[in-house]
Amino acid sequence: MSLSTPSSNRLAASACLAASMTLVGSYVALSKPLAAAFPVLLLAWLRFGVAAIAMLPWLRKPANEPPMRPSTRRLVFLESFLGNFLFSICMIYGVSMTSAVSAGVVMAAIPAAVAVASWLLLRERVTGRTWAAVACAVGGIGLLGLAKPGHGTPGGGQGNPVLGHLLLFAAVLCEAAYAVIGKKLTGSLGPKRISALINLWGLVLATPFGLYFAAQFDFGAVSAGLWILLVFYALAASIWTVWLWMTGLRTIPAAQAGVFTVLLPVSAALTGVLALGERMGVLELLALAIALVGVALATLPSRSVSDL
């Protein structure tokens, strides 16, 4: 494969993609202490609100953008409802019931889920290697069920790990729908505009719940460190990861860019261990290894990768 872009541009683009997936993994893990401090629906509302303020300039319609058709408006709503609102709720609740290590393993199923969703909804071809990736994802998640409940977190108290894993898998399905719908939206809207519009819809959807929980929540009891973490979570989830990913895709083909999703589960697991004091036992390590094999199978191009 011949490349017309300078190697320095490819290195910069690769760094953007790597940073994007690393940020996704870290904010998935760091949502755990936030979910312990805020009601989940209040946390989602605050996240969308902070991001909406930061993305106000992105809401402006570019001069060269055609008016949105009704079908595009419906897709924008679905993109937000599934990929922003429901994903956030399922992910935060799931992490709060399990561990960041578990979240890393389950989130490693995203590439395989996207491939299957593309096969079902877009009629794209799915190779045998992708089905093997699905099997790896199922195997990794299954191994988590064999681990001792509460093993991943200091102190062991973890609510309902089985329900947490199911919620995390629901978040994976939401993310797959988000990716498939996004493929359709990028044909008519720019990435900044898509990000701002779906975040605004997320804010609208979360506002009734947010107002209800805010009315009875003691904001003064939240430490300054958690407020800083909340701002980081909002900006990383809604702005930085999207901008970095789209910037990298300007230079790196999408098939090759998928390789960088391997950093998501690794980042989530490492953040859980290094920042949250979680532990990884033998079963968790094996589950993560199997999940990472699945990511590689689902994302590495089938032809020679010597040109990566």
Image: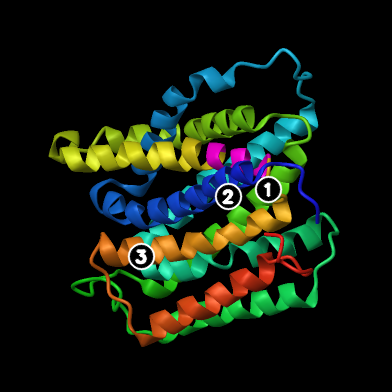
Crowd around label 3: few <14 · some 14–19 · many ≥20 (10 Å): many
Q: Which residue is mark 3?
A: 270
Q: Which residue is mark 2?
A: 14
Residue 268 figure quarter: bottom left
Q: Give coordinates of residue 7: x percent, y percent.
A: 64, 46
- Going from N to C along the chain, the mark reached first, 3 or 2, is 2
Answer with left or right where residue 251 lies relative to residue 50: right
Give the CA separation, mark 3 to mark 2: 21 Å
Q: Dot 3: what SS?
A: helix
Q: Residue at x 19, y 42 (%)?
A: 225
- Observer-side mark, 3 or 2, equals 2
Q: Is residue 117 above or below residue 220?
A: below
> Which image quadrant: the N terminus?
bottom right
Q: Which residue is mark 1?
A: 252
Answer with left or right where residue 127 lies relative to residue 60: right
Crowd around label 2: few <14 · some 14–19 · many ≥20 (10 Å): many
**Outermost top residue:** 63
User: Along the line of sight, which residue is nearer the eye, 166 or 58?
Assistant: 58
Q: Give coordinates of residue 119: x percent, y percent.
A: 80, 62
Q: Residue at x 73, y 37 (%)?
A: 185
Quick check: can you spot residue 209?
A: no
Magenta residue span? 243-250
Q: Are marks 1 and 2 in contact (CB under 8 Å)?
A: yes
